[in-house]
Amino acid sequence: MNLTTLEIKSALGNSLKSQIGLNDHDNWSSWSTDSRLKTEGALFIAIQGDNFDAHDYLNQAYENGALGFLVKESTFNQKKSTYNFEASFFVVEDTIEALQKISVASSSKLDCLKVAITGTSGKTSAKYFSHQMLEGLVPHYFSPKSFNNHIGVPFTLLDLKSEHKLALIEIGMNHPGEISNLVRLAKPNVTAVTMVGRGHLEGVGTIEHVLNEKMSIFQEGQTHIINIDDPRIYKDYQKKYSRNLSDPNFNIIKISLKDKTADVYFKIINAEFNSFEIEGHIFNYPGKAKINIAGEHHGLNVAIAAAVSKIAGLKPENIWKRFEMIAPVWGRSEILKSKNNVSIYFDAYNANPESMKVFLSQTKHLSDSPYFVLGEMLEMGDHAKDVHYELGQLVGQTPHKNVWFIGPSCEVFKQGYLSTIGLAKIKENLMISSTYEQTLALKYQSMLQPEDWVALKASRGIGLEKFLKDFV
């Protein structure tokens, strides 16, 4: 962030209701939303959430160095008598809307190539892999957290600085129109969709609506990275954006693990439990590399990283060499060891029907019969019953010793599991609970012996990292 008071006022426009103690020539180079942090000279943006209100902590923010405050008019008027300091205030109708406006104003001042990535699964991994490929070579910024919503994307934009030549921006979605709004804020030069699956059905209803939302990212950018292995993506792109395919002003980069005519083509030639090998070409430059992460399904995320690296200026021959830099991301295909030598495959940051299917397929590389700790696939809405019954069936068909399922759909999962494994085995093979319980975790862990494998996957909201804390 690097804005003068005058530039902030201009960006806010009519949403600025009043101002206190402002000098038009003051320059705001840092910002904060956390009153606990030391932020000398920062602009503190008072966000209101469902369970907190930052307006309650303005005194603390001032004590920690904040000199300016972006506040909501109605809340500020109600609480200003409790503030025991004098400072500069931008008083606005809505602080989140104001945050978005100043983030656009700040980022638009920079000469920075912006890459926006969305998808039902894989967007965070593709972002991290791109960062790992570029680290030390191209000055760039990426949000270390999954800042991918109406607040997180503006945070990313405000963090951009003049030295950044490229920004990696993650774009998420849980309701209609969200991606369109976020890409209008970000104004990316490059856009990509990793894949489209049954995620966030609670917010949008059907996979057709998920597709429509994800594909709206391509309304921005002059370079589009297209996964042609996903028939939904490629068919929909040809339908909605066919003019781009013949427009010389558009740069279309096709990625694939199947089609050799793609600009970035990788074939998986060997897969083990914690790595896989690829061979193919990057813009006709052939090569072969080992990717030191679990799960060959990450091949397409690696392909996006390769495409981003090429856009950023790396030569294909150097991109092939840089693949050795790719490493696992927390909560995604991590291989861990417990203190008693039990191996853990931890992939519990996100879950939907498609990623669960890939996860279960991946466990064949771990052990002939691993243990499973699985949890609810959240945000499935009216589809929750069907997808968890389907998951129970799929788990029953996948070799394993025992499974513990955690979540509100545990009884539905049990019925699907029962339909494939049979009543005789269900008592010894299945544990269920509606929530995570430490006593059950300890009971489950008592079954595990050295050299066993246990594979964990659930939506982030289930909090399966608690299993690791109670165990590792």
Image: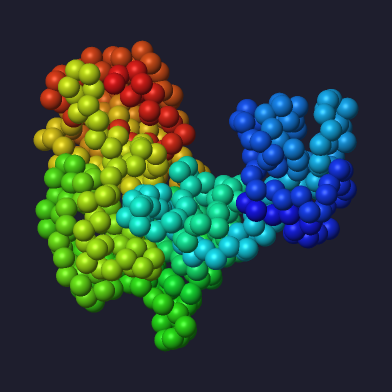
Question: Which residue is drawn at the image coordinates 14% and 32% (left, top)?
Answer: 369
Quarter containing the C terminus: top left
- Say if residue 237 shows up in the picture: yes
From the top left corner, tell me how far across and down residue 408 is, in percent.
45, 30
Q: Choose top left, top right, bottom left or bottom right for residue 286.
A: bottom left
- Say if residue 121 shows up in the picture: no
Q: Choose top left, top right, bottom left or bottom right for residue 433.
A: top left
From the top left corner, tell me how far across and down residue 112 is, in percent.
52, 63
Residue 445 in the figure: left or right of residue 150: left
For the residue pair 369 and 41, the one nearer the viewer reads as: 41
Q: How many marks?
A: 0
In the image, is residue 20 above or below residue 192? above
Question: Which residue is drawn at the image coordinates 47% and 61% (left, top)?
Answer: 165
For the residue pair 417 and 361, the one nearer the viewer reads as: 361
For the residue pair 446 and 35, the one nearer the viewer reads as: 35
From the top left corner, tell me how far across and down residue 89 is, in percent.
81, 42
From the top left corner, tell me how far across and down residue 223 is, in percent.
44, 72
In the image, is residue 56 above or below residue 396? above
For the residue pair 282 and 345, the one nearer the viewer reads as: 282
Residue 160 in the figure: left or right of residue 387: right
Question: Which residue is drawn at the image coordinates 34% and 29% (left, top)?
Answer: 405
In the image, is residue 453 above or below residue 270? above
How is this picture coloured? rainbow
Question: Which residue is drawn at the image coordinates 46% and 60% (left, top)?
Answer: 166
Residue 113 in the figure: left or right of residue 444: right
